[in-house]
Amino acid sequence: MGLAQNLVFGLVTGSYIAIAAIGFTLIYGIVNMINFAYGEYLTVGAFIAILTVGVLPLPLPVAAVVAMAGGGLVSLVLARAFFTPINDTGPVPMLLTSIGLGLALRNAIRLSAGRSARYFDTETTTYRFDGLPELPVGPVNLLGDVFVTSQQLVVVVSALVVFLALHALLTRTDVGIAMRAMGDNESLARVRGIDTQRIRDSVWILAGVLAALAGVLVGIQTNVNADTGFSYILQILSAAILGGAGSVYGAIAGSYIIGLVLALSVAFLPTGMTGISSAVAFLILIVVLLVKPSGIAGQEVREA
Amino acid sequence: MSLADRLPEDDSGRAFLFGAGCVLLAALFALTPLVASVPGVLYVFFEVGILFVVYGMLVLGLDLQYGHTGLVNFGHVVFFAVGAYTVAMLSAQDSFAGLSLGYPWPLALVAGVLVAALLGATVGATSLRLRDDFLAIVTLATAEIFHTLFANFRGIFGGDTGILGVPQPIADLAGDGDTTLVATLLLFGGITAFAFALVTRLTEAPYGRVLRAIRADELVTRSVGKSVFTYKMQAFVYGAALAGFAGGLFALYTGAISPGFFTINVTVTVWIGMLLGGASNHRAVLAGLAVIMGLRLVSRFALDVAPLSADAFASVRLVVIGLILVAIIRYRPAGIWGDARELGVDS
């Protein structure tokens, strides 16, 4: 497999990590916590979509919207039940709570869905939109011997749409501007009349929506089981910290770097060693924290 | 003066005495023709009991790090695992997969402690200056990196199979299985009591006061001329070495190790034990761990009567454990037996 093919894989991986990492970094920047249960939100989103496609049955794009709505709701409810009450106890109790919540969620999902992997029903996952040319299901030949599947195209395009929509939200809307103000200085934002609890709730909803979308996109690439989200959490975390915890644009950059490094490490590691490519992402995380703890574009994380 | 008056008054002295008694009893079972017989229903008590005293060493080290110094080490399992793997690879003979160098086990045990301490020093040197929650993330990521390495490098670490053929010195001495169980529980229990005595002596000394001062207010501690980093580093390395020792003993007891023994669930169990009992109080953290390990016992028995598969039951247990962690932090941040003022948390 050529280098160019691996770059395509890296771009795709980077795209869904980026969608998730934005939500993660918003929670870090505005609620000031590392949410370790965040990976489970991806799993929840993927399972909602799979159920919607399989049981109702609705076409995949509709199911994705249902999953995003469900993800936002789940995220808000969990935040209100578990995180908001301990908001002022500091980062460590919040982190430990999220680790406990993640463990509980993961196993609750395993309990209801079982250990086996679930797939999207391929009959309903062809991408057909009225008025648009039908996307082929098989791989598309790009340049020479580089292939890309329509699912991969959907992931990359979805990420671009998310980035544009988010940029508009953060720069054009009152909620988005208030989010940025809170990220900069919460007490100042409160003094200026921003309803900080309402903004926090909006961040939780937005993060849940993004995680669910990322989960659905992971789901259409491969299969999904109870551990899917957990297997991504350290990559999401690495991407967010590499970009600079709290910085949305940094998280996007960090995600593509992680995605490319993962894809290239698969290319350069001997066969049978590809399982350690996830360790590479964590190694990046540690190195970043040591060399430049504030990441590409973020806040200081060392002690004063 | 009666015998009772000569008994030591302080916790650490009594723990030394208790530990010595346990070790002597263990030696009695292991070295003499004396045999023990354990009724079948009690096996599970002994198995969970041995795991409890091994995890007890982990929780004591963690309490030194978090309860006293305030270091949020969320990768404690890695030091346990590294100790176990070092001992296993150095001492095993004819393992199916991975290294098996066949050195004498006492040498391997010393090496296991040293390697764990060295890893602790490396992680500490690079990350003890980070903010609390980032230290947690770095230690957790370190543990995940090592877990991935263990599970993937078949030639060195044995991959998913792990390492077999580790010597089992207690079993060799004791002869039959029941006597081995009793002697192991007594010996490991005695060693955990020694560990308790040592950390208690350490934290009751002025040294421990400095550690608690760092936890309470790092800036003030630094301003009175204490090298905060040195103290943090020492606490971190002591905890790591103790965990490595526990891992080595664990390998010499089980005779075979695999990545499945060293998942994040070990870290979570030990953390819950510590928080539930009350961090910064060595007796309380052991009691908290006993409560959480008791849950493991209960779930083993409940499995026999509940209409659930073993798989589903394992999930239920982990859901409960996760929710217990959440509930302690919310409703009992100082733990059941902890002192809220001592820890500086509002409850």
Image (spheres, coloured by chain):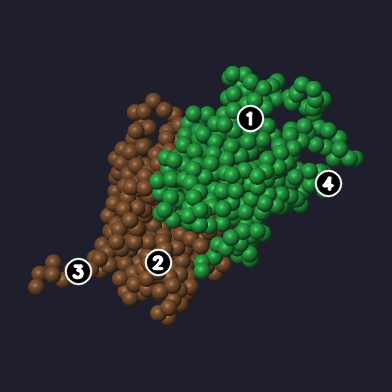
Chain colours: A green, B brown
Gap in angstroms between the C-alphas marked 1 and 3 = 67 Å
Q: Which disc is residue B215 wearing? A: 2
Kind of residue sitting beneath label 4: Ala
Closer to us: B170 or A224:
A224
Q: Nearer the viewer, mark 1 or mark 4?
A: 1
Which element is circle 4 on? helix
User: How dense is the environment of label 2, judged by Cα within 10 Å: few (below 14), some, or many (20 and up)?
Assistant: many
Closer to us: A257 or B63:
A257
Gap in angstroms between the C-alphas marked 2 and 4 = 51 Å
What chain does badge 2 belong to? B
Q: Relative to residue A125, is residue A235 depicted above or below?
A: below
Are dots 2 and 3 on a single chain?
Answer: yes
Which element is circle 3 on? loop
Is residue B191 at least partly visible in the picture? no
Q: Which disc is residue B69 wearing? A: none
Q: Nearer the viewer, mark 2 or mark 3?
A: 2
Residue at left 47%, top 67%?
Answer: B237
Position of the N terminus of chain B, as image quadrant, is bottom left
Give the residue pinned by disc 3.
B9
Q: Nearer the viewer, mark 2 or mark 4?
A: 2
Q: Which disc is residue A64 wearing? A: 1
Residue at left 36%, top 37%?
Answer: B299
Kind of residue sitting beneath label 1: Ala
Which residue lies most toward the left here?
Answer: B1
User: How dense is the environment of label 4, judged by Cα within 10 Å: few (below 14), some, or many (20 and up)?
Assistant: some
Are dots 1 and 3 on a single chain?
Answer: no
Give the residue pinned by disc 4.
A4
User: How dense is the environment of label 3, judged by Cα within 10 Å: few (below 14), some, or many (20 and up)?
Assistant: few
Instruction: Residue B343: name its quadrant.
Output: bottom left
Which residue lies most toward the top here?
Answer: A56
Residue at left 30%, top 44%?
Answer: B38
